[in-house]
Amino acid sequence: MFGQNKKLAVAVTCSDWRLHQRRVDFNSRIGKEVGCGRVDMVVLPGPDGLLLAERAGEWAAAQAQSDLLAKAHQADVLAVIAHQRCAGHPVDDHQHEVDVVATAKALKAALNFAGPAYALVATYKSDSDWGLKTIGKY
Ligand SMILES: [Zn+2]
């Protein structure tokens, strides 16, 4: 039944190899969390740090890439997925939850996106075992 879900999400997430192992199954899990059977990935280090002034160039690139995919694939949902113990945005667990919400809201606004933007955090259990928690939907 899940494979019949043709809704599509554009997900901005981290490059960290630990998230992209077969056993973590990150793409499918993001899709299930946001109700989409298809997930495009925009991948860069520390996505919830994109609003920092020194990352303006990366932020512009991530917006352009997300916008291209959202329009080409008629996306239903946007998502920004932070993760704990992130080298690309090395803040504490609470700050990831704050920053991922700000980034998800900013991405929705920047793209003038009509659908929901989810803020998620992948929670650390071990390098090969991650939880996935929804912080909010905006
Ligand atoms: Zn990371």
Image: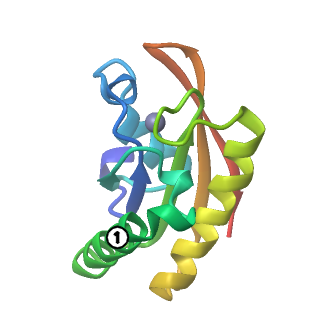
State the residue at coordinates (59%, 21%): 124
Q: In front: 46, or 136?
A: 46
Up-down relation of residue 66 to residue 85 (above or below): below
Q: Residue at x 66, y 46 (%)?
A: 134
Above or below 67: residue 130 = above
Q: Residue 7 in the image: x percent, y percent? A: 38, 64
Q: Which quadrant, please, contains the N terminus?
A: top left
Most foreground residue, 124 or 99: 99
According to the image, label 1 marks what residue?
66
- Left or right: where does residue 138 sit relative to residue 106? right
Q: Looking at the picture, tell me which residue is in the foreground, 118 or 93.
A: 93
Question: Residue 34: percent from the left, percent from the top?
Answer: 53, 54
Q: Secondary structure at mark 1?
A: helix
Residue drawn 53% across the image and 22% down it: 130
Q: How many marks?
A: 1
> Which residue is most to the left?
72
Measured along the vertical axis of the image, is residue 108 above or below residue 114?
A: above
Task: Identify residue type, mark 1.
Answer: Ser
Q: Can the viewer see residue 28? A: yes
Quarter placement of the C terminus: bottom right
Specify the quadrant of the image occupied by residue 21.
top left
